[in-house]
Amino acid sequence: MKVAEIKEFVENYNDLPAAERKEGVIELIRDGDLQRVYALAKSGTARAALRILADIGERAKDVVAANIDGLLKLLRADDAKVRMLAAQVIGNTCAADYLDELIEAMMHEQTVFALPSYLLAIGRAKNDRAKRFLESYQLRSDIEKHRDEENAALNKALANFVMRTKARVRVLPTDVVVLASPNLNVTYSLCTEAGLKPRKFGKYIAVTSLVDFYDIYKMRAYTDAYIYLGSSPVSELPAFLKQREAAVMQRTGVTGYRLEVRSVAHEVRIDIIKKCVSAMEQLINTPSSYSVEILIEIDGDTAQVFLNPLTDNRFDYRKKAIAASISPGVAASVCAYASEFFNPDARVLDNFCGSGTMLYERGFYPHHSLTGADINMTAIEAAKENSRYAHVHPQFHYIDALKFTAKKYDEILVNMPFGLRVGTHTQNERLYKAYFRILPEILTDKGIAVLYTHEKNLLEGLIKSTGAFEVLKRATFDAGGLYPAVYVLKKK
């Protein structure tokens, strides 16, 4: 940017739309113009210039180091907002080096709305001196709004000293454990087979009377397992969560948590999180190093509250994924759905294998061999990397699915391209038609094909028009807001 353009950008920064602010900041960093921004902090645009440097965070470290004496002087500026922003800039870049100066400035600060910025800056020092200061700190605000903000900042600053610890989960016989499922019927059947006496609970499957919470991880056909903490009117959520703090700690043995709110607008979500975090006194909000997650799902005026202990290691083999990779919980559910047709001696092929997830989940059932193919080299590299951590080790080939026709397979198990996350519907029309020309040739006479796709109309039209396959089963799945279907086919 030219000097005049930088000045105009800084002067108008606070009034610009978020996208324009972000674009301008990227340009300033790319062109090495942050020193010019700092120069404006010594003029009438100090607030805006410092706001930009604060928003840039650690990427402003070099310009801060070059001008640290000037920034330290701004901690004693007449304008409280300038002092507050200067503390933020120093906190984001070099808090540990200038901790004494931050503490001294805070102790002399008389404007209460500036105190949270000092607390957060001191917390970012992440050393024993900062910890001792924060632990002994007494709230100074006497106005409820400012006191709440000061307390929230103190808790967030202290969260820097809470180490992430893996929960050790225990449940009571009366606890309800709910399973998020891509297909409720599949998960329900799996739970029934395991003797868990499941019931449908809205969009979840609920089970009770678990003796050992970790038994739930012996099943694979679901995405997440939560301990249900109950429901509350949205307006009473802060008090509700405060009452559940002891239950969370009793069930997990940890205090660091992250709060997530779903199904509401961003502004409402932020307001709910702020109020709930402020209400809790025993649990510590540590969004960058949390041990458990508290999930709130809003439905009108009612909230359902769940605890995710984050102890699920069922899918730890998947270290790498690519765009449009199938969720391992969905892949496990697809395999469970089709498993009644699996052959324990099957030679299994996934010729749209991506990072290999579908094959790895098929590997939990008896088989003769597992083979994957993909036209994307990055996908094949990811699949091979995942093989290092998996219980099975398929053979992977970098090749176009339409050219991988030399052998026949007893099972073909694929996540077909959707055309929503990768590619287009028009491209898929050509691909699917070509694929259905080779599919009968690479499938043994008694073999099955398990096809998972969102292109349901396209696939069903090809099944009908080719006349080569009979549909043994079909079901719709939930995949993160998309509703693909699974088709189990056999040759006529």
Image (cartoon, rainbow, N blue to C red):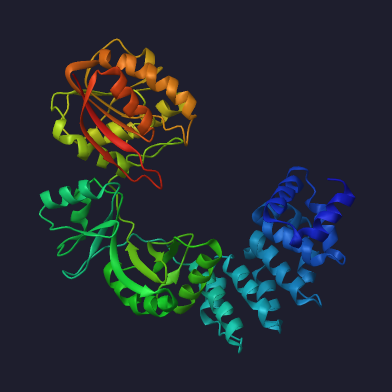
Residue 108 position, x and y percent, is: 71, 83
Residue 320 position, x and y percent, is: 41, 37
The front one of 370 and 228 is 228
Q: Quadrant of the N terminus?
A: top right
Q: 461 left or right of 152?
A: left
Q: Residue furthest right?
A: 4
Name which quarter of the figure residue 14 lies in.
bottom right
Q: 359 left or right of 162?
A: left
Q: Residue furthest top?
A: 406
Residue 405 position, x and y percent, is: 31, 12
The front one of 491 and 380 is 491
The front one of 196 and 433 is 433
Q: Quadrant of the C terminus?
A: top left
Residue 116 position, x and y percent, is: 62, 75
Query: Taking the image as drawn, is residue 78 in sight?
Result: yes
Q: 468 left or right of 157?
A: left
Name which quarter of the figure residue 130 lies in.
bottom right
> Compared with residue 102, is residue 289 higher up or lower down, i.e. above or below?
above
The residue lying at 73 percent from left, 63 percent from top is 51
> Compared with residue 35, is residue 171 higher up or lower down, i.e. above or below?
below
Query: Taking the image as drawn, is residue 350 in sight?
Result: no
Q: 337 left or right of 315?
A: left
The residue lying at 27 percent from left, 69 percent from top is 251
Query: For the image shown, how many numbered marks are present on the structure?
Result: 0
The residue lying at 18 percent from left, 55 percent from top is 215
The residue lying at 43 percent from left, 36 percent from top is 324
